[in-house]
């Protein structure tokens, strides 16, 4: 059994198409579990229609924002062998979930994610997000690239993740991914895409908007001194360092301590454990280290 966790918010325009693609998954048993994050459009009517037909279960709660809504869903979800995150505006190819669970273990912490196929609002493909990560814990502290809508995880991993609720949570995907790698869980990256990732101008988050756009976003975070990597690392240490593999726990400690020492930050920038597959991200991370805004 796979429980698909769908967080909705004013998503009436594309919601039916997404739900239908989830329900048409082949080779797996699916339970669609939905949390509505305070919609004011026709989203609830659509969910109620499918619920009345016995095709999904949903509930509504006050607005938390996308990241915390997904973590709330994960905590509230019923017992299942696997859990998968779903956005409200994509389209899943029929083999998406089978491609994931056929590579995972149901009895140990394990996580799957994949590349995505970008499309326009009419689902016409426009390209593929070409990522090829190193799949290391250190890289996860530096590089935020995981598409949450492709993540599938085992129950043993889910049961660890829900033991701690962070105060600071920019996005749920890299959070879950970092925990998996910190634990030493089995992590599988699929270079093949099984999802049409719709870009329509109102996405909460997005991929594939270009190198210049990404650089501007990252530089903006540096100039605003958001310290997002550092703050996420602090949350990881509070919640999970005692469960992490020793070398990952130590790297996390060094990453946090460097905040208060320029020599430590300079040394951190040379650590091979923090190597990043994306050269632009690697460069901007070093800039953020020097500016102490990482």
Image (spheres, rainbow, N blue to C red):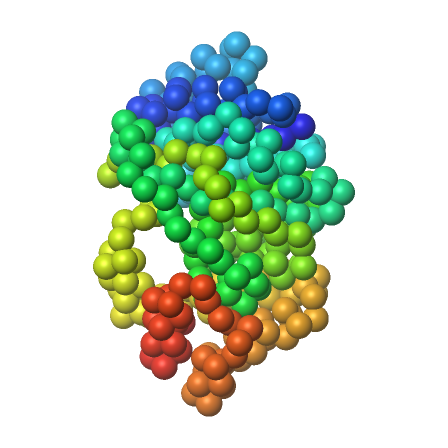
- For the question of whether residue 255 can be seen, the reply is yes
The residue at the point 29 percent across, 30 percent down is 124
**Quadrant in the picture for residue 265:** bottom left
Could you tell me which quadrant the N terminus lies in?
top right
The residue at the point 45 percent across, 45 percent down is 115
Q: Which residue lies furthest to the right in this view?
A: 107
- Place of residue 95 in the rendered image (x, y in percent of width and height, measured from the top left): 54, 29
Q: Is residue 61 left or right of residue 202?
A: right
Q: Nearer the viewer, residue 255 or 199?
A: 199
- Place of residue 221 in the rendered image (x, y in percent of width and height, measured from the top left): 31, 64
- Place of residue 97 in the rendered image (x, y in percent of width and height, measured from the top left): 57, 32
The residue at the point 67 percent across, 59 percent down is 183
Q: Which of 134 and 218 is in front in this view?
A: 134
**Quadrant in the picture for residue 2:** top right
Q: Nearer the viewer, residue 111 or 88?
A: 111
Could you tell me which quadrant the C terminus lies in?
bottom left
Q: Which residue lies furthest to the bottom in this view?
A: 263
């Amino acid at each position: 059994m796979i429980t698909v966790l769908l967080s909705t918010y004013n998503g009436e325009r594309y919601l039916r198409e997404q739900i239908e693609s989830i329900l048409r998954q082949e080779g797996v048993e699916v339970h669609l579990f939905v949390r509505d994050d305070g919609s004011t459009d026709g989203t609830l009517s659509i969910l109620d229609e499918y619920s009345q037909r016995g095709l999904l279960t949903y509930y509504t709660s006050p607005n938390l924002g996308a990241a915390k809504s997904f973590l709330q869903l994960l905590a509230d979800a019923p017992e299942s062998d696997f859990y998968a995150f779903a956005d409200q505006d994509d389209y899943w190819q029929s083999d998406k979930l089978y491609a994931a669970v056929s590579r995972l273990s149901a009895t140990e912490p394990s996580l799957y994610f994949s590349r995505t196929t970008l499309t326009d609002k009419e689902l016409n493909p426009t390209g593929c997000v070409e990522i090829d990560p190193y799949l290391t814990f250190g890289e996860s502290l530096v590089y935020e690239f995981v598409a949450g809508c492709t993540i599938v995880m085992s129950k043993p991993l889910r049961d660890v993740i829900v033991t701690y609720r962070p105060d600071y949570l920019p996005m749920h995907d890299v959070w879950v991914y970092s925990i998996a790698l910190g634990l030493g869980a089995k992590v599988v990256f699929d270079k093949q895409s099984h999802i049409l990732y719709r870009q329509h101008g109102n996405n909460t988050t997005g991929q594939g908007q270009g190198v210049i756009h990404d650089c501007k976003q990252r530089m903006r975070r540096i100039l605003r001194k958001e310290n997002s990597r550092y703050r996420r690392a602090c949350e990881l240490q509070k919640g999970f360092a005692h469960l992490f593999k020793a070398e990952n726990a130590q790297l996390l400690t060094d990453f946090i301590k460097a905040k208060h020492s320029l020599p430590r930050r300079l040394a951190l920038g040379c650590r091979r454990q923090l190597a990043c597959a994306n050269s632009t991200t690697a460069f901007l991370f070093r800039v953020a280290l020097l500016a102490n805004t990482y």
